[in-house]
Amino acid sequence: MQWKVVLALMVSFALLMSSSYTMLVPFLPIYLSKELNCPDSSINLWSGLLFAVSFAISAFVAPIWGKMSDKMGKKPMVIRSSLLLAITYFLGGIVETPFEMFLTRAFQGFAAGLWPACLVLLSAYTPKSKIGISMGFMQSANICGGILGPLLGGVLATAFGMRNSFFVGAGVLSLITLITIFFIKEPPKDDNEPKTEIQKPSALGMLKNRGVFILLLCLGITNMVILQIQPIATMYVKELAEDGSNVILLSGLVFSLGGIAGAIASPFWGRAGQKIGFYKTMIAALISAGILIMIQGIPDNLWLFALCQFAGGLGFSGIFPSGNSILILLTPPSQRGTGFGMLFSAQMVGGAIGPVIGGVIATFLTLSTVYFVSGGVLLVLGLVILITSPASIKVSAQHISEEKQKAKENYMEKIKQEALSELKEQEHNQNK
């Protein structure tokens, strides 16, 4: 298959899976109250459990799915996750009690992994010279889905009821499954894999590589910061708004600005990483995002905060595409599923820890303090990685392409020399 065709399909999948997820998950507390008859006194507890169980199980099983991707193939893992997720969405539409929804969310955590599976499949087709722009488009599609999802979820829930929203999500994931089965081919194995520092296909072997370990830590902490801010963001908007009414509408508008900025900037970050190196763009994105998030804790005016939110989206959108691209360059195709599985697991761990930390800070200090702490964490993280990173994480796509080309040239030269040697030997035998 042409890599551009695969890219178009994977970008479509990213948009569909992200919008399906975000049109349902933000409304789970309302679903608990209106459809599952959960007492008001228990909604916060059940909401926390529903979020936590999915993150926890995903973090545990993601490396397992990744390793199976390396052994069984990339395409089967996309089919596995999309099909199982479709089932979980369908079950979410027929449950009757909070506990049944808890079990469904636990199953959803087990089924998760469609995003890393799509990244692994795409990486197997994408030329090294196009990794950056491909990861940028994937991130952009993921962000766009996050913007469209809540809007679609609100419209569907209002017009047809929340249960039907789950059935729509199940239909979308089923569509991804069918397209994968009938239109996507398993990528061929690369018999001329470039040598990397990672020689063991196990998760333990990868963790021993300092470059991969730092990458996992970086993206895990970044996701922790994102989930640290999200639970208190609506309350912060309410605090800044002069008029306390329409907080949900104002919050949606303000937070969509960061998503819009990220969707616009992600391909540019990817293209920049391709030119100057993904390590450099990741550091730049971490430091700029950290500073911009800290600034969000300063304004006492909602519109200034909204402007900072847009600027923060520009910085944030460069972290994940750069990190994903570095992982692709660090791992050969036969180990990439394991690598992305571990990366997804690290992000799920961060996502589980973040809301707890944010809630504690907001409870004992102030809402603005959450932004100062979150931004400071990213700023320090960027500086630490800048100072302590090994040479392996600084590898560039151009460097690998040049090495591969040089290896091919050396191989061709070797063949030529052997052919000349054989001709000379034949001439020498004929002269005798």
Image (cartoon, rainbow, N blue to C red):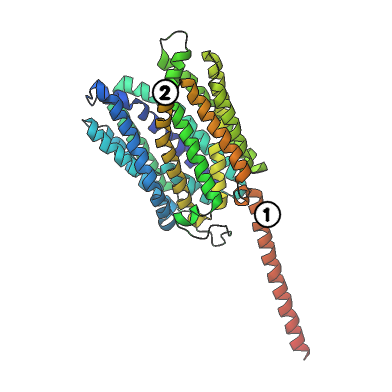
Chain-order first, disc 1 or disc 2:
2
Amino acid marked by disc 2: Phe
Instruction: Return the residue at label 2.
Output: 364
> Which residue is pictured at 41% across the width and 50% down the height?
63
Residue 349, percent from left and from top: 42, 40
- Quadrant in the picture for residue 303: top right
Q: Is residue 395 visible?
A: yes
Toward the viewer: 355 or 99? 355
Toward the viewer: 370 or 192? 370
Residue 168, percent from left and from top: 33, 31
> Which residue is pictured at 39% across the width and 36% down the height?
352
Label disc, if present, on residue 402 of the rendered structure: 1
42 sits to left or right of 115: left
> Which residue is pictured at 40% across the width and 27% down the height?
360
In the image, is residue 167 above or below residue 60?
A: above
> Which residue is pictured at 75% across the width and 88% down the height?
430
Label disc, if present, on residue 388 of the rendered structure: none
Badge 2 element: helix
